[in-house]
Image: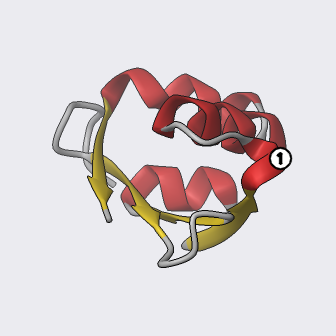
């Protein structure tokens, strides 16, 4: 495992073709903290990247949330 830094952890938020569902893909330490490599969030979780990341923090807990300051986030959609 590499040290924490902006390149060590990547979180990619992707829009699904239908705006009702968002896919979040996680890599490196974010994947380890979440326990999954990807997950889907429906519209009730939010419509912005920040809202989806916030919902992910609630779902995956403190360990995941603590990694976010070192993450890079990409929106693809």
The residue at which mark 1 appears reads as 44
Mark 1 element type: helix
Q: Looking at the image, which is closer to me, 3 or 45?
A: 45
In the image: residue 29, left or right of residue 35: left
| Visible residue check, residue 42 | yes
Residue displayed at 30% across by 32% down: 4
Q: x%, y% of residue 38?
A: 57, 72
Q: x%, y% of residue 27?
A: 39, 63
In the image: residue 57, left or right of residue 13: right
Residue displayed at 52% across by 37% down: 48
In the image: residue 63, left or right of residue 2: right
Residue 35 vertical position relative to residue 55 in the rendered view, above or below? below
Residue displayed at 39% across by 21% down: 69
Residue 12 vertical position relative to residue 73 in the rendered view, above or below? below
Residue 24 vertical position relative to residue 33 in the rendered view, above or below? below
Q: How many marks do you count on the picture? A: 1
Q: Looking at the image, which is closer to me, 68 or 14?
A: 14
Quadrant into which the C terminus falls? bottom left
User: Badge 1 local density, few (<14 within 10 Å), some, or many (20+)?
Assistant: few
Quadrant into which the N terminus falls? bottom left
Residue 35 vertical position relative to residue 47 in the rendered view, above or below? below
Q: Picture quarter containing residue 23?
A: bottom right
Q: Residue furthest bottom?
A: 17
In the image: residue 70, left or right of residue 37: left
| Visible residue check, residue 36 | no
Residue displayed at 54% across by 73% down: 37
Q: x%, y% of residue 13?
A: 43, 55
Q: x%, y% of residue 72?
A: 26, 39
């Amino acid at each position: 495992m590499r040290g924490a830094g902006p390149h060590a952890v990547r979180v990619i938020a992707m829009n699904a073709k239908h705006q009702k569902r968002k896919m979040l893909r996680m890599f490196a330490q974010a994947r380890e903290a979440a326990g999954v490599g990807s997950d889907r969030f429906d519209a009730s979780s939010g419509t912005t990247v920040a809202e989806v990341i916030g919902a992910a923090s609630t779902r995956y807990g403190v360990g995941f949330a603590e990694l976010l300051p070192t993450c890079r986030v990409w929106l693809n959609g």
